[in-house]
Every structure is written in C-alpha cells, then in structure tokens.
Image (cartoon, helix red, strand yellow):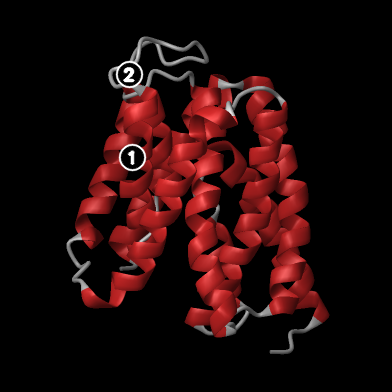
Amino acid sequence: MLLDPLVLLALAGAGMLAGFVDAIAGGGGMISLPALLSAGVPPVAALATNKLQGVVGTSLAALTYWRRGFVTLRKLVPSLFTTYAGSLVGALVVKQIDVTLLDVAVPVALIGVALYFLFAPNLSDLDRAPRLRFELFVPLMGFVLGFYDGVFGPGTGSFFTIGFVMLFGLGITRAAGNTKILNLTSNLSALIIFIIAGDVVWPAAIAMSVGQVVGGYAGARIGIRFGAKIIRPLVVVVSIILALRLLIFR
C-alpha cells in the first residue's frame, strides 16, 4: 500500500504522541489507530500496523524503565511466558467466542480504574505491603490480561497498572515499568500472527515506529522523573477518554 509522504509524516507525529502517552499511562492506541484509519488504511491492516509500531515504542519504554531500576526482570520471567500464552490463546479463539459483553464491561472497568487513581489515598511511588504474593499471582494476572489483550485489547495497560498497585503493592512508577514489560509481551504474540498473515503496512509502520522511538523514550523519562505526580493523573485521563470512546463509538 502506497502512502503520500505528507501522510507518512503525519503518521510519524501521531506515533510520537501515542508513544509518549503510552509510555506513561498506556492507551496510546487510541491515538495511533484512528490516525491509521484516517489515513485510509483498511481496518485489519490498521490493527496490524498499530501493533507493530506500538511494540517499538513499548519496547523502548520498557527498556528505559528497566535500565533505571524500576523493573526486576528475574521476578517477571514466569509472567512473561504466561502473558504470552494468554495473548496467543486469546488471539486464536477470538473468532469463536462472543465478546459483546465486553463492550459495556470494559468501559465500566476503566471508569473504575480512573476513580481508584483519582480518589484512593496514599497512592505514591512508595511500595506498600502486597495483598497477594508476587511470584505466585503475577503470572496468573499475566495470563488473564494477556488473554483479554488477545481477544479485545483496549485498556490492557491500565488494568496491568492497577493490578500491580492494588494487588502487589508496587509504587506507581514501578507499576508502570512492570506494565510495559508485560504489555509488550502480550502484544508480541498478536503481532507475529499479523506479520505472518501479511497484514502490516510497512511504510506506515516504519514512519510511526520512528515517532514511537522519540515519544516512547521521552514519555518513559518524564514518567520516571515526575513519578506519581504525572502518572496518576494521566492514567485517570486516559482511562476516562478510552471508556467514553468505547461507549460512544462501539
């Protein structure tokens, strides 16, 4: 598929903005996917291209959080496998199950996430006592949310973040870093399927990936620098906007 150079430049800008938002609070897809559709990319190709450019930005953000010490990869290794497995199973069975209930359930859940981050006391970058044991239950969370990402997808990052905060006591910046790692893993399985099927529009994917590199790195650095002061309100805003978008444009 051929795209005008000016369109590719606009897509690169959309990728940069999406990468910035996604690195801090997740939800960058609500910027990048409509941009691809507006550029005339067919829906399936837009989904595939969006996955690829999103993986580039998420990879850089995840690497930045890890290098700054906000992620302990050794503790996440089992969760990487279960998240990948859950996403792969979800992508394979999505055509065989009825997901219409998610049209309402997901926006309601996202509004719940927003309200929690808006009103819960003592949300900060300090770790707290976990409610569940990390080594046992993060892999389970990874499989469940990986499956959801393979089946439906919107809000996966927000759900990972609130899980790490509420259930496992991580400070908000560490929760964001761990979210990037698992969100990246869940996206890879779907991306592989899209690439094998030949659905990716490579010129658009490359242009947006360049933007994602800039936005993802800048977003991760700002998220690390300002911590809960920026991550908390941005999660609230992104969750509400995504919930409204799902309710209005379903």
- Name the foreground residue: 229 vs 217: 217
* Numbered label tally: 2
Q: Is residue 235 left or right of residue 49?
A: left
Disc 1 target residue: 141
Residue 78 in view: yes
The amino acid pointed to by label 2 is: Ala
Q: CA distance from mark 2 to mark 1?
A: 22 Å
The amino acid pointed to by label 1 is: Met
* Residue 239 at x, y percent in the picture: 40, 43
Numbered tag placed on residue 120 in the rendering: 2
Q: Is residue 88 above or below residue 116?
A: below
Question: Quick one: quadrant of the C terminus?
Answer: bottom left
Give the SS element for disc 1: helix
Q: Quarter of the image holding residue 13?
A: bottom right
* Residue 87 at x, y percent in the picture: 40, 58
Give the SS element for disc 2: loop
Please tell me which of labels 2 and 1 falls first in the chain. Answer: 2
Q: Is residue 46 left or right of residue 94?
A: right
Numbered tag placed on residue 200 in the rendering: none
Residue located at (59% from left, 76% from top) = 195
Q: Is residue 8 above or below residue 152?
A: below
Which dot, 2 or 1, sits closer to the camera?
1
Question: Quick one: quadrant of the N terminus?
Answer: bottom right
Residue located at (59% from left, 84% from top) = 198
Residue 117 in view: no
